[in-house]
Amino acid sequence: MIDTDSDIYRDAQRKAESSSTSPEELDSLFKQNIGPMIQYLIAYNPNCLPETLSELACHNDVAVRWRVASNPNTKVETLLFLSKELDPMVVSEVAGHCKCPMETLMQLGKSTHPLILSAVAENPNTDINTIVRLSQGADLIVRALALEHPKYPKNLADWLDVDW
């Protein structure tokens, strides 16, 4: 690991943070393994290659995996891998990701963790059955988010096809 006060480290940090750093430069920087903070910044950079993000998804630092889960370039396969993560912060980022598949959202919607359930309730890809179930849960914030979801039925009785 490189001393954080060195010019090499500061240059790496500047490159990892910059939106003008190319995907190839970020990948090269990743392979240098300068330190966890640099890996974190690379995972957060929207120019990061999906393949680099897939490798970073196995990083031992949960903060790096959290940033991988939030990166728009993260592949669906990587999100599926991270959806099995034990840390609720990482899983909530997966649940909130625009590429998270509906089947995964249905599974994550069975969680007991309010942070994960909130992300599921806010994701536009969440199916109507999960939204309705979340709207009836114990957590008030999750319920409110589900009730505000665009897929929540305007008339629940019509959706249930019940003749009252």
Image (spheres, grey):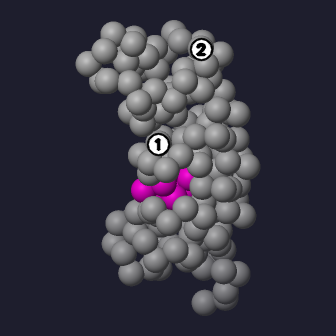
Residue range in magenta is 89-95
Which one is nearer the viewer's eye here, 140 or 91? 91
C-alpha distance separating marks 2 and 1? 18 Å
Mark 1 nearby-residue class (10 Å; few <14, some 14–19, many ≥20): many
Residue, far left: 5
Number of numbered discs visible in the structure rendering: 2
Element at label 1: helix
Q: Which mark is residue 64?
A: 1
Mark 2 nearby-residue class (10 Å; few <14, some 14–19, many ≥20): some
Q: Which mark is residue 93?
A: none
Position of residue 154 relative to residue 58, above or below, is below
Q: Position of residue 43 (x, y in %)?
A: 52, 33
Query: What secondary structure prevails in the magenta region?
Result: helix
Task: Examine the rendering and report whether any part of residue 28 can be seen.
Answer: yes
Position of residue 50 relative to residue 85, above or below, is above
> Who's the residue at 58% across and 67% down the image?
108
The quadrant of the picture occupied by the C terminus is bottom right
> Who's the residue at 60% across and 60% down the image?
83
The quadrant of the picture occupied by the N terminus is top left
Res. 137 image quadrant: bottom left
Q: Position of residue 115 (x, y in %)?
A: 40, 63
